[in-house]
Image (cartoon, coloured by chain):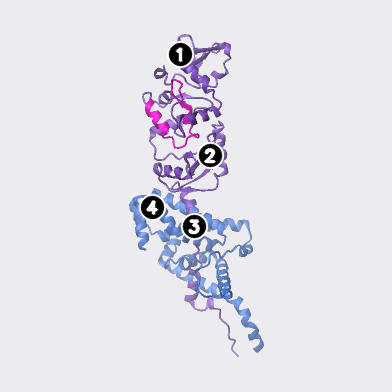
Chain colours: A purple, B blue
């Protein structure tokens, strides 16, 4: 007797098998598209982090941090990011651990921690100003003219101020550490002069002392033992004991007295304009 | 494909603004190719992501004319299957192939005719799982051809160009693939038929 086989539906008709194979198509995993676009820097994510100014929103993509703003009003943050950057933005639960740690270390003053910044779409001048501001150590300040001189554009003091006010990543690029040469605090994009005072105070700067010294016209401090002259907030200047402290109104006077400019804070940069 | 023609034109004009359109149109099929070839969803997701990033990098290096001439479907299939093949070697290195079975995830259910009873649905799901497993058991080059030709739905010539093989080879490979699949799928169902056969033997 011939054996009859119950042929399975799946394997009988060739077209049936082909249709079944086509049925194996899967939808893309939920986060695949967003992960790819963010990775490529064609879209961004944001989440909150604590800061001396309260919660801030950190926006990033595969190329680096692209935006930092106050997180109080998420809609406002998204609107401002949309206006200025214009890429799709998606809020996520938290900043990835390595990035959060790097930002925390930076805000704590560790300048050796690597942080990638996505500064596409900004002018060469703006980027030069921001990169120069990155060199100012925590707890110190520099005049606008200092940045201008350091980037080789000594006359562009006002433009430096404008570039700093457009800093897309405040706190990480410490534009708050740039003040007016008369010692007054100047403007701040992340919440005005009051916020700037808060951050500088949190960084250990004595603003009252700094402002009163500047008001009395003393913009440089020399050490009678080393004969080095510094900007007042330079970490070298702050180590000078009261007995050996020599205030100067101008760098020229210090040099005439046999002082040489500090190689760390380079008080000569922008000095002509500041004097 | 019409939509792909429009897409390459947009990619040629402005890669950065048009690329999300490519992701939207092709991410699912690239993930499907990777998953049906590898059988490990987490690896497949990484392969698809990596393939899309590489596609972007390649497009960024092409001039507009070259982008407009691209045949996106086979081109993206090539990138995906090459990365999946490399990934496969690493998966095989880290576990014996016999352990692949439990890792096969059927995942999403395709649209099923309304009114199927729960047992019928369960059976359909089981058939789908069996087919996915049988596919994973095909020899690598044959699996590649079957996945691209029938799961992804490329034509014979697109499959040939995606895999850089002659069309005749592809035809022979998919033919052999379908035959192997039928043979591998049949025995499990024969068991039900056999008792009757044995009684009359």
SS under mark 3: helix
* Chain part drawn in magenta: A157-184
| CA–CA distance in space, label 4 to label 2 | 34 Å
- Dots 3 and 2 on the same chain: no
SS under mark 2: loop
Residue situated furthest top in the rendering: A257
Lower sequence index among marks 2 and 1: 2
- Dots 4 and 2 on the same chain: no
- Dots 3 and 4 on the same chain: yes
- Residue A128 drawn at (x, y percent): 42, 31
Q: Which mark is residue B82?
A: 3
Tags 4 and 2 touching, CB below 8 Å: no
| Circle 2 residue | A55
Quarter holding the N terminus of chain A is bottom right
| CA–CA distance in space, label 1 to label 4 | 58 Å
Q: Which mark is residue A249?
A: 1
Please say if B7 is above or below B125: above
Query: Does the image show residue A202?
Result: yes
């Amino acid at each position: 007797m011939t054996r009859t086989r119950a042929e399975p539906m799946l394997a009988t008709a060739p077209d049936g098998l082909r249709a079944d194979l086509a049925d194996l198509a899967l939808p893309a995993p939920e986060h695949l598209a967003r992960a790819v676009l963010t990775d490529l820097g064609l879209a961004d994510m944001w989440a909150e982090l604590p800061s001396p100014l309260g919660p801030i929103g950190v926006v990033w993509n595969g190329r680096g941090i692209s935006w930092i703003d106050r997180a109080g009003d998420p809609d406002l943050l998204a609107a401002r990011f949309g206006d200025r950057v214009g890429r799709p933005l998606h809020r996520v639960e938290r900043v990835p651990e390595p990035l959060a740690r790097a930002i925390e270390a930076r805000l704590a003053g560790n300048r050796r921690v690597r942080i990638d910044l996505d500064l596409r779409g900004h002018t060469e001048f703006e980027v030069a100003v921001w990169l120069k501001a990155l060199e100012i150590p925590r707890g110190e300040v520099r005049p606008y003219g200092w940045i201008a001189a350091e980037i080789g554009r000594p006359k562009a003091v006002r433009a430096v101020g404008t570039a700093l006010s457009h800093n897309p990543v405040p706190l990480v690029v410490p534009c708050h550490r740039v003040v007016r040469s008369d010692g007054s605090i100047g403007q701040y994009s992340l919440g005005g002069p009051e916020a700037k005072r808060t951050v500088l105070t949190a960084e250990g700067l004595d603003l009252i002392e700094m402002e009163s010294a500047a008001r009395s016209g003393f913009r440089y401090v020399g050490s009678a033992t080393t004969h080095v002259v510094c900007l007042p907030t330079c970490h070298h200047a702050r180590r000078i004991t009261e007995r050996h402290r020599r205030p100067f109104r101008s760098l020229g006077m210090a040099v005439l007295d046999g002082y040489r400019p500090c190689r760390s804070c380079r008080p000569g940069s922008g000095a002509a304009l500041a004097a | 494909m019409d939509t792909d023609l429009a897409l390459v034109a947009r990619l040629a004009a402005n890669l950065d603004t048009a690329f999300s359109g490519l992701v939207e149109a092709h991410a699912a099929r690239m993930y499907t190719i990777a998953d049906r070839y590898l059988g490990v969803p987490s690896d497949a997701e990484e392969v698809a992501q990596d393939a899309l990033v590489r596609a972007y990098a390649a497009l960024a290096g092409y001039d507009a004319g070259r982008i407009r001439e691209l045949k996106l479907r086979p081109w993206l299939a090539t990138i995906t299957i090459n990365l999946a093949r490399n990934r496969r070697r690493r998966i095989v290195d880290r576990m014996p192939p016999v352990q692949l079975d439990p890792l096969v995830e059927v995942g999403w259910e395709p649209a099923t005719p309304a009114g199927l009873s729960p047992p019928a649905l369960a059976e359909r799901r089981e058939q789908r799982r069996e087919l996915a497993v049988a596919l994973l058991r095909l020899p690598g080059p044959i699996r590649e051809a079957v996945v691209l030709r029938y799961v992804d739905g490329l034509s014979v010539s697109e499959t040939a160009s995606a895999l850089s093989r002659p069309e005749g080879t592809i035809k022979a490979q998919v033919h052999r693939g379908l035959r192997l699949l039928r043979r591998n799928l049949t025995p499990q169902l024969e068991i039900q038929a056999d008792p009757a056969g044995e009684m009359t033997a």
